[in-house]
Amino acid sequence: MQYKVMKKYKTIIVGAGISGIGCAHNLLNNKYRDFLVISPDIGGRITESDNGAVEYGAYYIMDIYHNTKLFVEKGRKIKPSHLIFHNRDKVYTLFNKQIIGNLTELIKLTFILFKFKRHYEKFKKCNLTRSQISCLKKDKYLWNLYHQNADDFIRQHKIKNIVYKYLAELLHGTAFAPIEKLNAFTFLHFSLPLIVATHEFIFDKEKITKRLKKNYLKDSVVKITKNTDDSYTVKTKNKKEFVCKNLVIATPPHIAKKLLNLRQKLRGSINAHMFHVIGELTKKWKGSHVHLFRNNSRMLAIAHQDDHSFLVYSVHKDIDFTKYFHTYKILKHRYWKPAFCITGSELLKFNQGKNLYLITDNNVVGIEPCYIYGKYCANKILKKTKD
């Protein structure tokens, strides 16, 4: 196979998901121009409907997402009172008479979440100048949470009833995983919408595309080779070849593992199906913003969109849509394989070799922490870090 050597760059970023965008933005903001982003698309697993009105991948942002607010437009507020929980034949809301009996646990959980939020905000600030692992180790509270099973944490703090009667559906519908498979850090991270204002959003892909236009190549990297002078050769699907001093891998974990031939273990992956549907819901399923299901169901969530369409998430492809809709039409089906690498506590190192940096979303999932990790990587290239 004949490859055409195109150009040498100081830095190549493989992947234009949120972490890759964060890295590229920070380089540009520091007037660093000698870099190339190679990716088949911009946004990665943030994709949208053909008209751009409905987000298919990441679904919400929180008000503490200070870094990513520059390229997203806030949509409707997702209120806890608008959530409907489904556990087999039981249907209930967060605020009902039964919660009075669990009020003590609810107050205790609220205090825990506020404590976690304080530490999490410090972690994000730390990650601008230090790696994620370094910042976790620096905060003993977060480090212990990351290496403690969520179920053990819940039982230790005696909040079992409030969590398993209410939060189990919330975690299953957003993290796509049962609580028992999560570590305590991830459990609390995904529970923050209970105390932090949360909104749907629209991703401003056009704004990012314009910003990156001179530094972006629409292509896929298929092979990476380290050269004798410690530079890297990058080969693409379209038979192009580039050489760089700094190489940044900002792809999903399973792609990074293949490209770098990683021997390190990834966190456990979760797969999910997403259907964008128009139609009329049956009476049972009307009147709610979001329906969330316990992990004993094949379903994950049904979310009513602002344009009156619906996003239906499921563990399995085969769904009996007539159970939920009088009439329906599937506009789009996406299979996220994986949707996340989110179970367990395996951590991937940032430094994978000399000037070889890995900023995949294995360690901490979410738009904001991934964008910050990209900013940290740029700071590393710019020699502005503390580690």
Image (tube, rainbow, N blue to C red):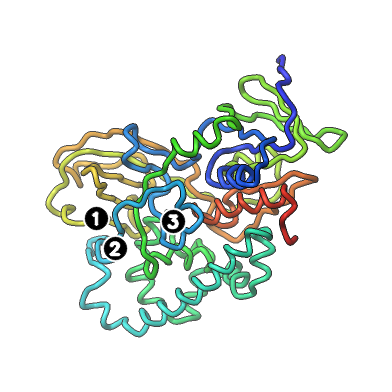
What residue did someone put label 2 on?
79
Of pointers 1 and 2, the one earlier in the residue sequence: 2
| Residue at far left of view | 283
For residue 281, side relative to residue 212 (left or right)? left
Element assignment for label 2: loop
Q: In which quadrant of the rendered view does residue 140 lie?
A: bottom right
- Of circles 1 and 3, the one toward us is 1
Of pointers 3 and 2, the one earlier in the residue sequence: 2
Judge whether residue 268 can be spotted in this image: no
Q: Position of residue 147 (x, y in %)?
A: 61, 68
How far is disc 1 from disc 3 in space, using C-alphas? 18 Å
How far is disc 1 from disc 2 in space, using C-alphas? 9 Å
Task: Check disc 1: other Cα within 10 Å, few if <14, some if 14-19, many if 20+.
Answer: some
Q: Nearer the viewer, residue 260 or 69?
A: 69
- Of circles 3 and 2, the one toward us is 2
What residue did someone put label 3 on?
175
What residue did someone put label 1 on?
289
Of pointers 1 and 3, the one earlier in the residue sequence: 3
In this view, 347 is above or below 218? below
